[in-house]
Image: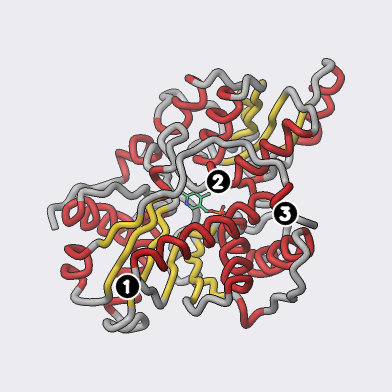
Amino acid sequence: MNYEKIPRQSLGFFPTPIVELSKLSEALGGSKIFMKRDDNTGLALGGNKTRKLEFILGDALACGADTIITAGAAQSNHCRQTAAAAASLQLECHLVLGGEKPDIVNGNLLLDQIFGCHIHWAGVNRKGEDIPQIVEQLKQAGKKPYVVPYGGSNELGALAFVEALKELETQRQDTGKSFTYIVFASSSGGTQAGLMLGKKMLDASYQIVGINIDKGETDKVPFDQFILSLANSTAKFIGVNHDFSEEDLILNSDYVGEGYGVIGHLENEAISLTAQTEGILLDPVYTGRAMGGLFDMIRTGKINKKDSVLFWHTGGVPALFAYSNRLNFSKC
Ligand SMILES: *Cc1c(COP(=O)(O)O)cnc(C)c1O
């Protein structure tokens, strides 16, 4: 398939900038660190889901949908960006959120409500288990619903990160920068599957290192298997002849700690030090954990001081407000 022809709905501002974090590198005692600022994609406070939604909602419009439905945690960045994108396209939006309706509405959930979407509380089902039943109800009400998968991680979402890697490669060549590693938070797999496929297509030499931030499984499939199968199905989808196997995948699960969204010293230190050296905000659930993992890999020599790293900032900053009681603002 000629994937240039796949419909794409513009939703954000691209290319996102790359900045060098020289003061943070110095504070850690080595390894050049660059950052790809997908926290600045421009859609409703930004994030990596903006890229995926350009393809997924492009498809929704091509299918004639009038209603979008997706799922996530109460503080899902994916849901917030989907709600914003749907509002901008005048599509009705339904979010199926894990947990119960909280007493205080803040962070991403506040933004979901500002965008006027319909929220369905799903208790323990934070990964969209209740979607089929809501889709049925919407159809019966005469709507044309379109399901955006959990985290936007299907072939279209992954394709967005093939394109993102091409965007990065153009910037890298224009500026003469080079990286040994690309490090980022990985949780529903679309970002990692797309970057892996992009690397293969461009024959790039850097290592794609996902930091796993969620202990749980989606649909009972182990996360590494899910990423590999999504990379393979995306390759097939765009006509690339490559079979990904275990040795193509670097998924570091050393930093999942107590599980999804449980904030500890690792995240607090990463958030404080990045803010206080560079004036850049990270989020508590994803980028804070991934950056904390990067700190550890640099300090323990798993990443060599001579190597350089591109940290892909995937967004998530609105969640800081919802986690205020679990953050501590130590001066570094
Ligand atoms: C969704 C998300 C990720 C993970 O991306 P996946 O493609 O779901 O693996 C990382 N960081 C933030 C801030 C996110 O919202």
Q: Could you tell which of marks 1 and 3 lies nearer the N-terminus?
A: 3
Under mark 1, the amino acid is Asp
Q: Toward which corner of the image does residue 295 lie, by quadrant?
A: bottom left
Q: Residue furthest front?
A: 174
Residue 81, label in figure: none
> Which residue lies under the disc numbered 3?
3
Cα separation, mark 2 vs mark 1, equals 29 Å
Q: Nearer the viewer, residue 165 or 5?
A: 5
Q: Could you tell which of marks 3 and 2 lies nearer the N-terminus?
A: 3
Find residue 152 and report its horizontal and vertical position in percent: 63, 46
Measured along the vertical axis of the image, is residue 326 above or below residue 254?
Answer: above
Q: Nearer the viewer, residue 211 or 15?
A: 15
> Which residue lies under the disc numbered 2?
51
- Residue drawn at x 52%, y 40% is 76
> Which residue lies under the disc numbered 1?
296
Q: Toward which corner of the image does residue 61 lie, by quadrant?
A: top right
- Residue drawn at x 17%, y 52% is 276
Q: Secondary structure at mark 1?
A: helix
Q: Residue furthest top?
A: 141
Under mark 3, the amino acid is Tyr
Q: Secondary structure at mark 2?
A: helix
Question: Would residue 263 appear left or right of 271 to someone viewing this image?
Answer: right
Find residue 24 and report its horizontal and vertical position in percent: 21, 63
| Quadrant that contains the N terminus | bottom right
Question: Would residue 127 appear left or right of 177 to someone viewing this image?
Answer: right
- Foreground mark, 1 or 3, reads 3
Cα separation, mark 1 vs mark 3, equals 39 Å
Find residue 273 and report its horizontal and vertical position in percent: 21, 57
- Residue drawn at x 27%, y 62% is 20
Q: How dense is the environment of label 3, judged by Cα within 10 Å: few (below 14), some, or many (20 and up)?
A: few
Q: Are marks 2 and 1 in contact (CB under 8 Å)?
A: no
